[in-house]
Image (spheres, grey):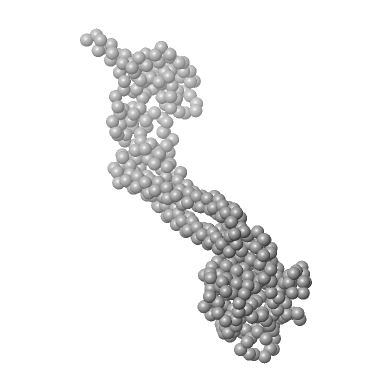
Amino acid sequence: MAAPDLSANLQEEATCAICLDYFTDPVMTDCGHNFCRECIRRCWGQPEGPYACPECREPSPQRNLRPNRPLAKMAELARRLHPPSPVPQGVCAAHREPLAAFCGEELRLLCAACERSGEHWAHRVRPLPEAADELKGRLERSVEHLRKQMEDALLFQAQAEETCALWQKMVESQRQNVLDEFQRLRRLLVEEEQKLLQKLEEEELEVLPRLREGAARLGQQSSQLATLIAELEGRCQLPALGLLQDVKEALRRAQDVKLQPPEVVPMELRTVCRVPGLVETLQRFHVDVTLDPDTANPELVLCEDRRSVQRGEQRQALPDSPERFDPSPCVLGQERFTSGRHYWEVEVGDRSSWALGVCRENVNRKEKGELSAACGFWILVFLGSYYTSTEPAFSPLREPPRRVGIFLDYEAGHLSFYSVTDGSLLFIFPETPFSGPLRPLFSPLSSSATPMTICRLKGGPGDALAPQ
């Protein structure tokens, strides 16, 4: 019987009277009693003395705590001989007493000994049911917050996926432009074609993975939010004890959720379809075009040499005829094309809007509304920072052209537009079986001090220079 008594005495002597657990960093008071350093610190929570011993209540004028190293070794020995038993759920790990209260400041469960320790004297401590009602409300608000975050994440994800699809279409469209343009000159420019396709592919590989990564990241965030919401909703269904157990960590994770929006990518391609020397080659098919005043809308003002046109502020008193455009602000070129290849250039300068192209000789010039290819108009329209056409097409411009080249291959059904400024392809109409005479069309859509001017090209008729 002596051995068990000795073992029990060892456990008793190695146990702190405050936390009822083996001593951790034990210290001795002036009255000779021993406590864990942290336990007595929390017990003597007031900033000034005197301090009463938790066992004998003898007051001490100041905190005079001396380390008790032999007792620390004895406590370690007792801990090895008799490891503490696992703490059951609902029991305080420090004091082995039932958890019956909740600290609103520290958001943790307390037992009666925790309340008596003095650490929570200035805190708001409430019974479990009352605390559970309040914390349940906070958890429900957290759920609503997370739901809103998930809705935003799903919205951003949808936008990111839509952006990916749009970007992919733009890449495919530009790729087709590159392929078509080089197909016409393949014998001479196969190497340049491959270089441009490589650049476009590199741009695609540079941008699309970032967009897809953003969409995937948003999907992952949505999944994580759904998991966290399910966890919190499940916690809300638990009894008070289960709901409040580790609730501080749950609320922290809910509040730490921050949605990361996808990266903003400019919706314009750096790679343009530019065939070296193509514009110079097309200029061999230059035709000298002049304006036909009998077709000009009454709001248009033509210069004397019939090479420039502006839209005036007032409508002119001109004779009406089937040949004259009205109400569309258009004028036709004097020339008629029924075969062959033809190229001309138009200086548009810094105009904010214009339209160029060709139309059939017999189009209805009194047509109201949009001029479409179905009605015999093949037109490229520039509006501020992007261009569109009478075919379903739209594209932003990195740099608006100041001079536009138009190339017509009648037999091939080919009509294309180029920026003479940098030689890039602006737009190409799908192959069209042209029939009947075609005439160049010009339209200054808005009033501007800058006219639209048909350029004289060096080497063309009269060997004159284009306007500066």
Residue plotted at (35% across, 34% down): 110
- Where does the image place residue 53, in percent across and percent down from the top left? 41, 21
Outermost residue, top direction? 2
- Where does the image place residue 67, in percent across and percent down from the top left? 45, 16
Side of 219 where 401 appears, left or right: right
Outermost residue, left direction? 1
- Where does the image place residue 74, in percent across and percent down from the top left? 37, 13
Residue plotted at (35% across, 14% down): 77
Q: Quadrant of the N terminus?
A: top left
- In this rendering, the answer to whether 98 lies above or below 313 is above
Can residue 313 be seen in the rendering of this structure? no
Q: In which quarter of the image is residue 98?
A: top left
Q: Quadrant of residue 254?
A: top left
Q: Quadrant of the C terminus?
A: bottom right
- In this rendering, the answer to whether 465 lies above or below 368 is above
Number of marks in the rendered image: 0
Residue plotted at (33% across, 17% down): 80
- In this rendering, the answer to whether 327 lies above or below 83 is below
Q: Quadrant of residue 265?
A: bottom right
Side of 275 where 453 appears, left or right: right
165 and 150: which one is in front?
Answer: 165
Side of 416 where 244 appears, left or right: left
Residue plotted at (70% across, 79% down): 290
93 and 323: which one is in front?
Answer: 323
420 and 106: which one is in front?
Answer: 420
Can residue 2 be seen in the rendering of this structure? yes
